[in-house]
Amino acid sequence: MVKLRPARSTDAGATGEILHGFTREHDWMPELHTRAETIAFCGRMIELDWMTVAETDLGVVGFLSLNEDEVHSLYLAPNARGQGIGQRLLDHAKARRSELSLFAFQANHGALRFYERNGFVETGRSDGADNDENLPDIKFVWASKGAADG
C-alpha cells in the first residue's frame, strides 16, 4: 500500500538518501554534493513546502518536489521503481496544476520516456551550461486538456 503525503522535516534523511543514491547509481551523473549536503537540500525543499512523499511499509520510497508549476524533482528508491509510484506522484501534481514544466537530463532515458508517456512535450534543449551538473537537458511542458483548450 502506497500513501502520498506532504513531506515532514523528519523525511529529509530518507529523501536525501534517495536523491544521493540516484547520483551514485548513474555514472553519467556527476557527484557534486556530499550525502549530508543532499539531505540538507531535501530539508530545504521540505521547508519550502514543495515536497510530497510516497510512503509504504518500508518507509519513504519516493518524492516529488513542486515549485509553483515546475516539477523540480521526482525520484524513487530503486526497489520502488516500476510499481506505478512515480505515476501516482506525477498524477498528484497534475491534479493540482493545469500546467507543469520540468527539465530532464538527456542521458536519463527512462525519465524521458516516462514524461513523454505522460503527455509532456519537449519545448527546448540545452547544452547544460545553465544547470549545476553541466549536463545537456530537455525542457518539457504538460498542460491539462482544459488548459490547452482555453
Image (tube, rainbow, N blue to C red):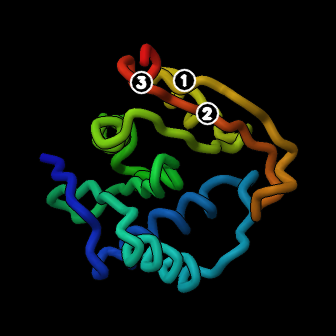
The location of residue 92, given as percent across then percent down, is 28, 42
Q: Counting residues from the N terminus, which is met first, the one under dot 2 or under dot 1?
A: 1
Number of the front mark, 1 or 3:
3
Under mark 2, the amino acid is: Phe
The location of residue 144, given as percent across then percent down, is 39, 24
Identify the element where label 3 is drawn: helix
User: In the shown orientation, is residue 10 left or right of residue 114?
Assistant: left
Number of the front mark, 2 or 1:
2
Q: Quadrant of the C terminus?
A: top left
The location of residue 88, given as percent across then percent down, is 28, 39
The numbered dot on residue 44 is none
Separation of residues labelled 2 and 1 (CA atoms)? 8 Å
Under mark 3, the amino acid is: Ala
Q: Which residue is mark 3?
A: 147
Q: Residue at x 56, y 58 (%)?
A: 22
* Front residue (pair 33, 89): 89
User: In the shown orientation, is residue 60 left or right of residue 14?
Assistant: left
Q: Which residue is mark 2?
A: 140
User: In the shown orientation, is residue 25 left or right of residue 82?
Assistant: right
Q: Residues within 10 Å of mark 2 (few under 14, many from 20)?
A: many
Under mark 1, the amino acid is: Glu
Are the residues flagged by discs 2 and 1 in contact, CB closer than 8 Å? yes
Identify the element where label 1 is drawn: helix
Q: Counting residues from the N terminus, which is met first, the one under dot 1 or under dot 3?
A: 1
Separation of residues labelled 1 and 3 (CA atoms)? 18 Å
Q: Which residue is mark 1?
A: 116
Separation of residues labelled 2 and 3 (CA atoms)? 16 Å
Number of the front mark, 2 or 3:
3
